Structures are given as structure tokens and as C-alpha cells.
Amino acid sequence: MIRLAVRVPRSRAELVLAELAVLAPAGFEEREVGDLVEYAIYGAAGELPDLGELRALVGDALVDVVTTEVPDDWEERWRHWHRPLDVGPLRVRPPWEPGRPGALDIVIDPGQAFGTGAHATTRLCLEALGELDARGPLVDLGCGSGVLAIAAARLGWTPVLGLDHETVSVAATAENARANAVEVVVRRFDLRHEPVPAAPTVVANLLRPLLEALRFEQPPRTLVASGLLAHEEVALPGLRVARRLERDGWQALVYQAE
């Protein structure tokens, strides 16, 4: 078994991941290596993406490509790498890990889609959601594997709408919502050409250029925006920053309507 990994700057990681989804729609293992983000996939020789095609997709964002042979016990090691994440009342866990008594359980199979809640930006969004008054409609913009949408439904928001430009993410969110027995409506969405549907609460785990491109049918009462480096600022019309949360060089901003 071979592990193939690409390393890219943190600031361009999410955009690169969207491109990589073409080669591996089942998703990538994600981890931080210093100031870089590494996306890895496992497979036998001949099953992995072509290196030339991989380099072409990532383009000038590519810092390094790393291939390593994986020991026979790789599956057990891989499982050990994916641990439960506890944030306030929520527990995000892979299927083989137990639930926590009294916790609001979110089960995500890391082999099915990228985005298991482990990244700092997702943790910050979960923390912010857990502190808000969970009522009324919520929009999860850039829903990925559906962690935040499912968390919102678990916490009490309804209805929950998940939006993403990638068809792989739309399918993953829908599948994970069904597996967790929560109601989440999911559809494709192009934020560069469509306004964000009106909702009192919006969560957007997106990089700064995408956050700056947001247009709203109606400004939300509360916006949780993550995907920002700790030094970055985003000014959004009709909204003011009410709170900042930071972790591992990333931050989430909680905006309130002016």
C-alpha cells in the first residue's frame, strides 16, 4: 500500500482541495505540517492518481509531493489517526469510536468524504454554534461533508440548508445527514453568481476571497465565518464583528446585524 500526499500553503488549501476532488471523490486525509496543509490518499501501485495530472491540477500552489510505503497495519493506524472530537455538547466521531453519554452525536466516516471536523476552522465553527441560540432556519455555506449542517440540526436549528459548489460535497452532506437521521436540505450553489438565501443564521467555513465575495438576499442576524488566518479581516456590509475565536493560527468571526 502507498500513501500519496501533496503539500500546499494553508492559504490556498481549500481551493486546492476542490480541484483534487476530481481525482479522488471519496476524499483525502488532511493534516497540517507546519505552515502547510497536506492532503493524502492511500492505494496500491497503479490505483493512485497520475503524478503529472496531480501536479497540473494543483498548479503553482504545489509545495511538495510525498509518496511513502505504508506498513501492513496501515488500516489500524489510519483508524487511530481519526479520533473523536468533543466541542461543547457535540461529539464528532468516526463510526468505530463510541459515543459520549449525553453528547449530541455526529458520526462521519472519514473514508467517505473530506471534512471530519478535525480542522481548526471547523472546530471554531462548532464552538461558535454551540454558544448561539439555536432556533429558526440556518444556512451552511460550503457544507463539505456536512459536519456543520448536521451539528446545527442536532443543536436545534430548523430547517437547515447546506450549499456547496462541488457535487461531491452535496452528495456527501446528503448521505451523512441521512446516516445521522437529521433533516438537511442540500443543493449546489455558486456564491460568485448567486446571493446567499435569507436565513437568520449563516455559517460559512470559507477562505477569505470567498467570504469577501458573499452577497446576501437579506443580511443574516448572525454569521459565523471561519477559514480565516488569524491576521485576516473581512468587512461585510450590514454586519459587525461581535466575537473572535482563534485556534492554531486560524480564526472564526461571529458577525451580528448592525
Image: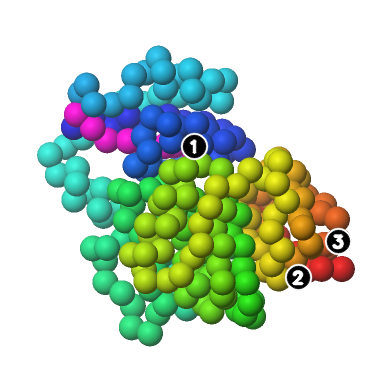
In the picture of the structure, the residue carrying the numbered disc 3 is 238
* Spatial separation of the CA atoms under disc 3 and disc 1: 31 Å
In the figure, residue 138 lies in which quadrant? bottom right
Label 1: few (<14), some (14–19) or many (≥20) C-alpha neighbours in 10 Å? many
Instruction: Identify the residue shown where x is 47% and y is 43%.
Output: 167
Q: Position of residue 13 (x, y in %)?
A: 54, 37
Verify whether residue 72 appears in magenta: no
Q: Position of residue 227 (x, y in %)?
A: 62, 50
At label 1, the amino acid type is: Leu
**Residue in front for this viewpoint, 238 or 215:** 215
* Spatial separation of the CA atoms under disc 2 and disc 1: 30 Å
Q: Position of residue 219 (x, y in %)?
A: 79, 62
Quarter of the image that includes the N terminus: top left
Secondary element under disc 2, as helix, strand or loop, is: loop
**Residue in front for this viewpoint, 5 or 173:** 173
Q: Which mark is residue 17?
A: 1
Quick check: marks 2 and 3 in contact, CB under 8 Å?
A: no
Answer with mark 3 or mark 1, whichever residue precedes in sequence.
1
Chief secondary structure of the magenta portion: strand
Q: Which residues are magenta?
A: 36-44
Instruction: Identify the residue shown where x is 49% and y is 65%.
Output: 184
Answer with mark 2 or mark 3, whichever residue precedes in sequence.
2
In the picture of the structure, the residue carrying the numbered disc 2 is 221
